[in-house]
Image: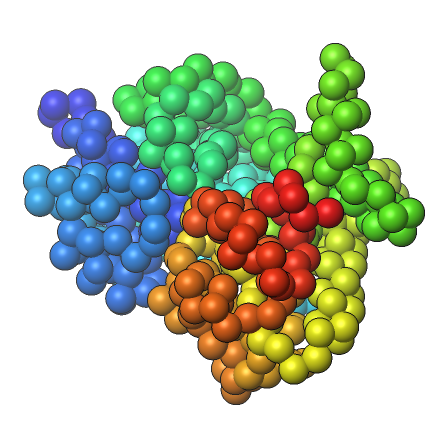
Amino acid sequence: MRGDTKPDVCVIGLGYIGLPTAAIIARAGCPVHGVDVSRNVVDTINRGEIHIEEVDLDGLVQAVVQRGLLKASTEVASADVFVIAVPTPFAKDGNHTPDTSYVMAAAEKVAAVLKKGDTVILESTSPVGTTEAMRDAIAAKRPDLAMPGITEGQPDVSLAYCPERVLPGKILEELTHNDRSIGGITPRCARKALAFYKRFVKGECVTTDARSAEMTKLVENAFRDVNIAFANELSMIADRQGLDVWEVIRLANRHPRVNILTPGPGVGGHCIAVDPWFIVHGAPDEAKIIRQARETNDAKMHHVLARAKALVDANPGVKIACLGLAFKANIDDFRESPARYVAASLAREFGERVQVVEPYAGELPMEFDGTGAQLVDIDTALEESGVLITLVDHDVFKVIPPEERSDKAVYDTRGIWPDVA
């Protein structure tokens, strides 16, 4: 470690979590070597620019790059602390099996440059046991290093798990101020990771074991998924019974101990739409409510698509405006987005009649290729379309007055226009 006690840090994965994390660590004065498999991402960051949309991130990245505290590369470099923030998607088996191959590939690259005294921290949302599996992969590559939980006596390196808790649009603020759960392979590992995070985290850092920290992250998102599923299921029941779900929820929430969430077209993003399946995969016979919540939220997408098609069929020949592709309001993240699924499905069926309004997109995603659908601005959609389908509650959509949509057939899946039943 450097004489000024500030560790050299290597952050592997420079996406929605890795890049903000790398920038905040660099802001704290630690030299950061960022690693990504994409040459375009690396070149963009080294120019002091960003490849994702996030509030205040552009200025921070520009500042730390100019100061020489953040450099990006496609190769892992020697460091004192390694932070792994790579994706953990589903395997391509159709069973929602977690794919930890990116984590293991990153761990093996770290193993090649690991030295005595280093700390390796996994931040990727992962199934329970992944940190230990990462430790084992490193141990297989580096039998010369004593590994925590395997060899007797003091280990040569420390390994820990520390997931983020952030909201897109507020990532920099929440990475700094939110509490963190830090799970070590051993208590000593947790303390080493704790000392690192206290350099840039102002929230409380609570230490635990790695498996508990892994499960905590999954549980947090499964809890949210279950509550969203209640609201989405209620909305489908209300549709069946001819009720205004927004009115029902508004009245029910006047109860002092009831707080029903707002329904939508499903659940998206790489966390809530994915993480609960990791729990189900680990305990398939016991995770009944968690599985049902996932299935309910997925079913809401198909319910919305069916209602949207019925509305289009009832208005033949007119253009159809799909408002939004992101998985939530005011961000450019389209991962696992139900809005994207619904809009793309409509585009494949109705072709050139479909207009997509997404203020955070420069072009339509690849699944729209060949459909004839067009990306347009909101004013064009309001002028030309006869059907409006609200899929995302972007601020720019909320402020559209009733008189600009009074002559259109409207399906508002987000409840942003109180005058629409």
**Horizontal and vertical percent position of residue 387:** 62, 67
Q: Residue furthest top?
A: 256
Q: Residue furthest right?
A: 241
Is residue 239 among what the camera can see?
yes
Q: Tell me the quarter of the picture where residue 68 sits.
A: top left
Report the quarter where the N terminus lies.
Answer: top left
**Horizontal and vertical percent position of residue 407:** 61, 62
Residue 264 versus residue 112: which sits nearer the camera?
Answer: 264
Counting the numbered discs, the total is: 0
- Name the residue rendered at 49%, 17% in the picture: 206
- Name the residue rendered at 47%, 76% in the picture: 374
Residue 407 versus residue 150: which sits nearer the camera?
Answer: 407
**Horizontal and vertical percent position of residue 355:** 52, 72
**Horizontal and vertical percent position of residue 299:** 78, 56
Q: Tell me the quarter of the picture where residue 342 sits.
A: bottom right
- Name the residue rendered at 79%, 33% in the picture: 248
Q: Is residue 4 above or below residue 308?
A: above
Q: Tell me the quarter of the picture where residue 55 sits.
A: top left
Is residue 146 among what the camera can see?
no
Q: Viewed as shown, does residue 126 lie left or right of 110?
A: right
Residue 56 versus residue 129: which sits nearer the camera?
Answer: 56
Q: Viewed as shown, does residue 17 lie left or right of 419?
A: left
Residue 107 versus residue 295: which sits nearer the camera?
Answer: 295
- Name the residue rendered at 64%, 41% in the picture: 418
Q: Is residue 97 above or below residue 134?
A: below
Q: How is the image coloured?
A: rainbow
